[in-house]
Amino acid sequence: MTETCVILDIGGVLEITPETGWVQRWEQRLELPPGTVNQRLGDVWRAGGLGSISEREVHEQVAARLHLDAPQVEAFMADLWAEYLGTPNDELIAFVRDLRGRCKLGILSNSFVGARERETSLYHFDELVDEIVYSHEIGIGKPDPRAFEAACAGLGVRPEACLFIDDVAVNIEAARAVGMKGYLFEDNVGTIACIARHVNATVPVPGPASAGRTGGRL
């Protein structure tokens, strides 16, 4: 079995996730000063990203800190997930799907509690790659070197065999620091060409990219 490996980020790479302005709309609706939502919930977002809080507890904290009733909390969280999940980057996903059996494939994502269930349901990433490492499940997020080490361990590969794709420069630098090759996602054309070179495959390069640089995660 080949040791060559490609590991990808989700938000801004496999998902197109531009900012929707949902936080600003809620601040206007609740007549709160700009920045209040993230100020009040910043530690909740961090805890959710590392899995130290459950979805139920997230809902409870949102209700308590923003003084929302149950239907409002559901609407608030629906807006959060709409931005978080974005839309699929179909071109890149299709290319990665065609790589199955030709190299090891993985995902390493700074995530939020509840992400696996939703992304599995919507996008079937569990069928796309061999291993998915979510920050909220291992309690470690990028750019911590241990996140990259966990992804390699889960795939059974050495870092130097891996190409890591992310849309955040500091994460690319961290991947390179542990021995991986790193490529900063900016569009599909460059990314697909880079992956093709890495796996030593002859793959036709597509036309103009349908997806450019996109937003990131919580």
Image (cartoon, rainbow, N blue to C red):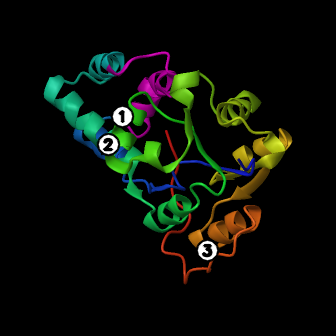
Image position of 189 (left or right of 194): left
| Camera-nearest residue between 179 and 24 | 179
Badges 2 and 1: C-beta atoms under 8 Å apart?
Answer: yes
Q: Residues within 10 Å of mark 1 (few under 14, many from 20)?
A: few
Q: Which mark identifies residue 121?
A: 2
Q: Amino acid at mark 1?
A: Glu
Q: Residue at x 53, y 47 (%)?
A: 129
- The amino acid type of the residue labelled 3 equals Val
Residue behind mark 1:
117
Rendered view: 192 above or below 103: below
Image-based side of 122 in relation to 140, left or right? left
Give the left or right position of residue 38, taking residue 75 as reference.
right
Secondary structure of the residue carrying numbered label 2: helix
Q: Residue at x 34, y 18 (%)?
A: 61
Q: Which mark is residue 189?
A: 3
Residue 114 x, y percent position in the rendering:
38, 30
Label 1 sits on a secondary structure element that is helix
